[in-house]
Amino acid sequence: MNASTSQGSPESWQPYSWSMRIVKLGLFLVFAIFLLNIGMLVLLSLGSGWSYPRFVPNRVDGAPWMNLFQSRSGILRSSLVSLGISSVVASISTILGLWTGVGLRRARSKVWLYIAYLPFVLSPVTVGLCLLDMSIRLGLASTYSGVIWAQSIFAYGFVTIFFCETWDVQIDKRVHLVRGLGGNSIDVWRHAILPRAWPLIVVAWTQAALFSWLDYGLVSVIGGGVIPSLTLSMFAYLREASVNQAAQSAMILFLPSLISFVIASFLLRSKWGKEV
Amino acid sequence: MMRNLLKLLLCAALVSLGFSCKRPEPALELNLDSADWDQISTAARGRTVRMMMWDGDPLINAYMRDYVASQVKEQFDLQLEIIGGQGNVLVNKFMLELDAGRKVGDIDLVWINGETFYQLRQLKALYGPFTDKLPNNRYIDWENPFIHTDFQQPVDGYECPWGNVQMAMIYDSSRVTTPPKNKEELLEWVKQNPGRFTFDNGFTGMTFLKSLLYEFAGGRDSLNGPFDEAKYQAASEKLWAYIQQLKPYLWKKGETFPEGVAQLHQLLMNGEVDFSMSNNDGEVDNKAKQGVLPETARAYVLESGTIRNSHYVGIPINAPNKEAALVLANFLISPEAQFKKATPEVWGDGTVLALDKLEPEWKSKFESVPGRERVAPRPELELKALLEPAPEIMIRLHEDFRKRIIESK
Amino acid sequence: MFSNIRRHITVGVIQDSWKLGLLGLIALPVLWSLLYSLAFSLGLTGRLAKGWTTEHWQRALMDGFLARTILHSVYVAFAVTCVVAGISLSIAAFGAELRRSRLLLIMLLVQSGTPAVVVASQTMNWFASGGMLSRIAFQCGLVQSPNEFPAIVNDTWSLGTILGISVTLLPLATLYFMNLWEAIGFERYCRLAKQLGCSSYQATLKVVIPMMIQRGSSMLVLIFLLALGSYEIPLLLGRQSPQMFSVALQQRTGQFNLLNRPQAFALATIYFIACSGLLLLYLRQRRRVNER
């Protein structure tokens, strides 16, 4: 964990040095809890039962994983489907959200920003049912397109708000510069907006993909249970099965995220590092 | 790098337009009213049949995905797809689909119980009558009142019985040597052991309350027949008075209840309470083997009786492959499939077949189903079985439990 | 002349095409949902609808639980927003090294990739009476049984619920404020404040954090709304009374009596009107502040 500064830039703002020590200690503590949490999930998923006051399962026999592999429950297929859908939702909503966010910043009327917030003021419990009606009439119910459409409503709204509100003012300056030098709209996007906005794009894409990856309500209602997402396979276990199966399901759901996020963190980190 | 990233994003967006509908095609037109079984099973060959069922139990899922799926593929060339969903999820889905005019749905067969059957009949969402088309229908114990009637409604061929269970109390025999046998003993025990008993806020908890309601209404057959408001009022007043007496001594002083039976099992496993319960009398064996319940868990029923009911499969009115659904339903009630799920290692679910209608070989197999170690044999429990009362009682119990117990101070 | 007009119109259409996105992808489905919800609750649609009636609205509004549920939901959402804002702002404002920490970034991203229901079950595994902390306390001799462990989940103050929802939303807010710091360049304001005589403490607390709150208020509003609509975590970690609005609504949506379903849609409509009204007030207020 190093504070990296590029050559020639002023040193980073640090309020007071003793607070840094506290903060570092706090960070390591949080990391230790984080690792303990993952460790507990791993341990619980490897056994059967967890009676009080044991720290480890009653029997560490790998039963949940053996049952999983023996039962041919299509986890791999579900994972690929979820990955595909979340990639598409993230891509659509990031592209549209970026375009809309940029447009929103220029707009005088805040009605458009209000519209972007609207998906989040719908009750999550009934929105699936109301959208199901619309999706049936549009012929999208129980289709991949329907699930992508429904999830994109929320992902697009979020990404729009995100871009609108976290816009880097340096980008606006670059836009003026490019236009001043005679650039057209394509040049503005290519040379002013995209190079600077790329960390925001990565964060937005990741958050939108996450939303889709973790979605259960929309995919179960709009997808009709027919679209085999990973959350559909795992959520029943999380709510209703044993603590061991729940731990196993939790790992299956967030382990791929862990790997992709480690990669994403390197990408983001390298971009932020360059900007200091 | 930016250019590549943009290209990737654009490609992904374009790919989305290429996703095609994954809607099942309806089977070829076959007049099911006049078709014989050979025609139905021939029409079903090579089709995919989708069954929506509760998928929260890994053993049941394994039975369906491994045994049933492979058998129907081998015997009937049917591809079985299991979809998770039950209760109100199912009802909401069909309610909206039919309201929006969706004539061809996604689901061919649904696993339902009395509540859902009642709601789906209200919505006219079930196809039927169909049970008399099934060759294995001849084995079903239709004389059994727990099978031909579901929540006091005649089944009328709109759902096919699949299994039979009875609500049982589960306790940890290492901490409780003499479990209470009736409501008086239960009240006494709870007062002497505060914080060690509770029931869930879900289906099983309500079934426990229904069992007690019978006691307060006058006994075994007191709630049979159509809903009687006066009888319900009189019995429920006594029930709520009884629960109010219990409440201060319940787990967390009755200020909160576990949301479902899975949480209740975990409380028993942790030693926070000494009792759990289940709608399936056979569950104690398979859950103890899975480590969900302690090895010392035992099950029993109250002297005053507990609710016994059957669970069923139904065919939605907009099922795209009704022939395949019929073939699957017929297999599920075959002696081989019924026997397979009767063993505790597989499921421990009671059969709906009349043993005296079976061939001698199957009869003796059913009579010697191994593995029931922690609960009395089913015939013994059946002596204390109560019929599910009218569905209106379930409605009222849900509402009144909230008003009279949860929200009362 | 006509080609100029055509070019202007084309440029205008392209530049305003984002409005089509908002209208088509958000406004239209939301409007449909609202109208469907309203129609269902008024008996105008639905398989068992009997025609126009305000009976479901009357029952939904007269039911005593509504006020308690709304108050409780607002309390939980407000508490979550305060917790999340406090922690995320502290990380962004106080931690120059934290902002550059790959470790923190990985933890935030992994946690943001954890579903709410997993967070709920993990919170149960740690903080329930039979959870890991209770087992540690038992082994240390601090408690003799799980029932002696203090109630953190299923408790009166919804501490477990607040903790669970905060853990779910914290990564989103933290990443946002960390990005905001980089985008706005708050370091310059801190240095300026220090040059003008502020102490480090004053600069951070009185200059930077208020600026970040003002600039990031839209994210805080979003956090509030997301917390308000939370379902899985309050279902597993909360009590049956008082309940959060989404849990109460789900129970009515799933009620056995189909004839009560319209009540759930009436409540959903109330939820929409209330939340969108609050949102509108907030956006108006923000615009007035910005104009000043």
Image (tube, rainbow, N blue to C red):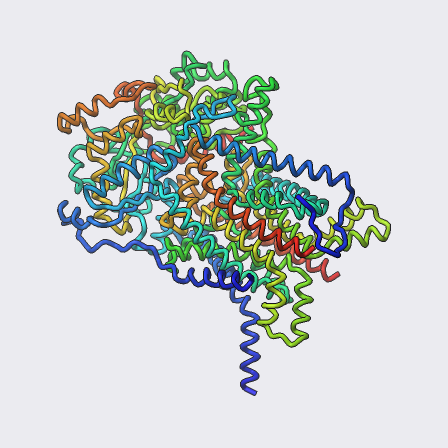
Indicate the position of residue B256 as horizontal and vertical percent values. Answer: 52, 29
- Image coordinates for residue C137, horizontal then vertical, percent: 59, 22
Outermost residue to the top = B177
Pinpoint residue A276: horizontal percent, then vertical percent. Answer: 70, 55
**Residue B235 appears in view:** no
Q: Residue at x 50, y 13 (%)?
A: B192
Q: Would you identify the image quadrant in which residue A183 lies?
A: bottom right
Residue A266 lies, with reference to residue B334, above or below; the image says below
| In the depicted structure, whether residue B190 falls above or below residue A200 | above
Count of numbered marks = 0
- Closer to the camera in the image, C18 or A229: A229
* Along the viewing direction, whichever of A264 and C153 lies nearer the viewer: A264
User: Can see residue B323?
Assistant: yes
Q: Please, is residue C237 above or below residue C59 in the view?
A: above
Residue lying at 19% horizontally and 41% vertically, measured from the top left: B75
Where residue C260 appears, as percent x and y from the top left, is 43, 43
> Residue B390, relative to residue C250: is it above or below?
above
Q: Residue furthest front?
A: A7
Quadrant of residue C133 within the rendered picture = top right
Q: Residue furthest bottom?
A: C1
Specify whether C151 is left or right of A252.
right
Task: Report the front residue among C53 and A19.
Answer: A19
Left or right: where does residue A128 sit relative to residue A203? left
Q: Which residue is at the front of the view, B19 or A219?
A: B19
Within the image, what quadrant is residue A74 found in? top left
Position of C155 with respect to A17 (left or right) is left
Please state, as top left, top right, bottom left or bottom right, where the N terminus of chain A lies in the image: top right
